[in-house]
Amino acid sequence: NPGTYPNFPAIGAQSKSVIQEVDRHLQAPYVMQSAVTVERQLPANTTVAVTFTNSHGLHVLRSEVVGAQPIFLMTSSGLYNQNQLITNVNSRVNAQVSLFGFYVLNKAMSNSDGLATFPANPNNYAGEYGPASTDIRHRFLVGGSINTRWNVRFSPYVQAQSGSPFDITAGSDLYGTTLFNGRPGIATDPSRPGLIATPYGLLDPNPIPGEKLLGRNAGRGPGQISVNLRVGKTIGFGPEKGGGAPSSGGVRAGGGPPLSAPNGMRGLFSPPTTGRKYNLTIGVSARNLLNHNNPGPIIGTITSPLFGRANQIAGTPNGEGFSEAASNRRIEFQIRFQF
């Protein structure tokens, strides 16, 4: 009980125990998805595709609190709905320049983000259906491949997205469930003591009966941006290869609107080749070239002095599959020999 700090409980004091069970009616979750795409070939070897997708998920896993014991019941009573509008552009400007990009307008709603999701009020599920953790409203990506006459390839890759939702909590076990996920109430009486002014309104960390609670995932974190660039120089020597022209690294149109670089990051950062049998490539790649600070998970406890801020940097797996603890600038020097 953090309310005892700095006076610790006496030795031998017992904490409330909980029992975790699996709902006997548990079902495997599934998602039904439908999509329609309109694609148009434009001049200058440019293709534009607009796609609308709808996803409807049933039996999403979540947990409920049952009884005074309490019992944590793992159920499949969750619901998930998502709509996306995706605009994708691929352009092969010429043999040396290829560009691609996409923009996604997204709205995702649910009453669960997985088995770790519990209702804020075990006796009232109002307000549980709200923005899902995947409700990133805007996503943008643009990149390309530019080959110069000296067989030097520039591969820029810029990603940006709006903020992710986060849950706002009161910071205490409001209902005696051993959970600290209770959400604050939306204050209607400004004179009530203990209220906290936030960008989301005047919130009550100790909601009274009948007071409307703030909805799940009502907070919204900051956006993120990452500018990446690879520069590679290829030297070809030896006899000429037979059977076709050298790879230009262009972007292949069609095949549906991708949500990443064509052929993934490997396709974006792959070195150029020549018409020779042997190719030596010397390259340097920079991720988050501008060293932009992308904050990590946002602290949603309104009683915390760090409410609405992050105490870490967002991390993502790097190209080798290792998870980095920060999204700070990363520069790699590479040498590759093909034969």
Image (cartoon, rainbow, N blue to C red):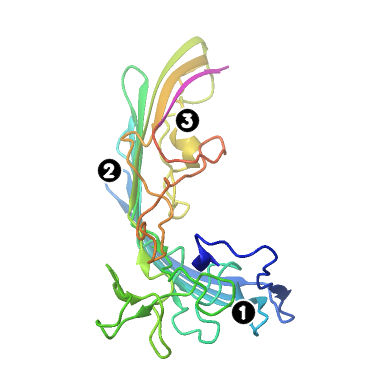
Task: Check disc 2 and report the residue beneath it.
Answer: 44
Q: Which sits earlier in the primary sequence, circle 1 or circle 2?
A: 2
Q: Which residue is drawn at 31% across and 23% down?
A: 148
Kindly indicate whether the residue at mark 2 contacts the one at mark 1 (C-beta within 8 angstroms).
no
| Magenta segment includes 170 | no
Rendering coords of residue 107 (x, y %): 39, 68
Q: Distance between the residues labelled 3 and 2?
A: 24 Å
Task: Check disc 1 and report the residue beneath it.
Answer: 65
Q: What stretch is highlighted in magenta?
A: 330-339
- Picture quadrant of residue 117: bottom right
Q: Which sits earlier in the primary sequence, circle 1 or circle 3?
A: 1
Circle 3: element type: loop
Q: Distance between the residues labelled 1 and 2?
A: 60 Å
Q: In which quarter of the image is the C terminus?
A: top right
Magenta segment, principal secondary structure? strand
Q: Which residue is drawn at 50% across and 68% down?
A: 3
Q: Which amino acid does label 2 sit on?
A: Ala
Task: Check disc 3 and report the residue beneath it.
Answer: 270
Rendering coords of residue 4 (x, y %): 52, 66
Whether residue 39 is visible, yes or no, is no
State whether residue 242 is above or below residue 287.
above
Residue extending furthest top?
238
Q: What residue type is labelled 1?
A: Val
Kindly indicate whether the residue at mark 2 contacts the one at mark 3 (C-beta within 8 angstroms).
no
Circle 2: element type: loop
